[in-house]
Amino acid sequence: LRVFETQFKELFPNHNVITISSGNKNWTECVACQIREYAKADILIGLHGAGLTNMIFMPPNSLLMEIMGQFDGRMLPLCGYHGSLAASFGVHHALHYYDWKGNEQLNAREVAKQTLAFYSILHHT
């Protein structure tokens, strides 16, 4: 997580970058705290999984960057479950794919650059 935090702080200097882990009991046991943080977020980056459904608390026109290590037909036509859920809440959705089965390492810098590219298009920066 630290590598991601460092890369995102560098590319998003005007954003409050925080990392969230399910290992943090203060975070996982306080649902109201979680909702408050997501309601303030304009970018959410995370691995494909149930935790990304918290995007429903994000403001409209925010961005979800979903990291996927496997790509199959379930992701089409709207990038899987999270794509259609994001669309129904006014959240933009993008996928970052890496081939974990082919032993490709997840590159935090590439995820951050791709997120910045999408964010810049959405916010004309």
Image (cartoon, rainbow, N blue to C red):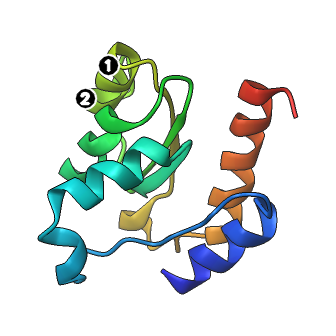
CA gap, disc 1 to disc 2? 6 Å
Q: Is residue 23 left or right of residue 119?
A: left
Answer above or below: position of 5 versus 61. below
In this rendering, the count of numbered labels is 2
Q: Is residue 79 left or right of residue 81?
A: right
**Secondary structure category for the residue under label 1:** helix
The x and y percentages for residue 36 are: 35, 51
Q: Residue at x 66, y 47 (%)?
A: 115
Closer to the camera in the image, 36 or 3: 36
The x and y percentages for residue 44 are: 48, 49
On the image, which quarter does residue 61 sit in?
A: top right
Examine the rendering and report whether any part of residue 11 can be seen: yes
Classify mark 2: residues with Cα within 10 Å, few (<14), some (14-19) or many (20+): some
Q: Residue at x 75, y 55 (%)?
A: 113
Q: Which residue is mark 2?
A: 81
Residue type of the residue flagged with mark 1: Ser
Of all residues, the one furthest to the right in this rendering is 125
Q: Are marks 1 and 2 in contact (CB under 8 Å)?
A: yes
Q: Residue at x 24, y 53 (%)?
A: 51
**Secondary structure category for the residue under label 2:** helix
Q: Which residue is mark 1?
A: 84
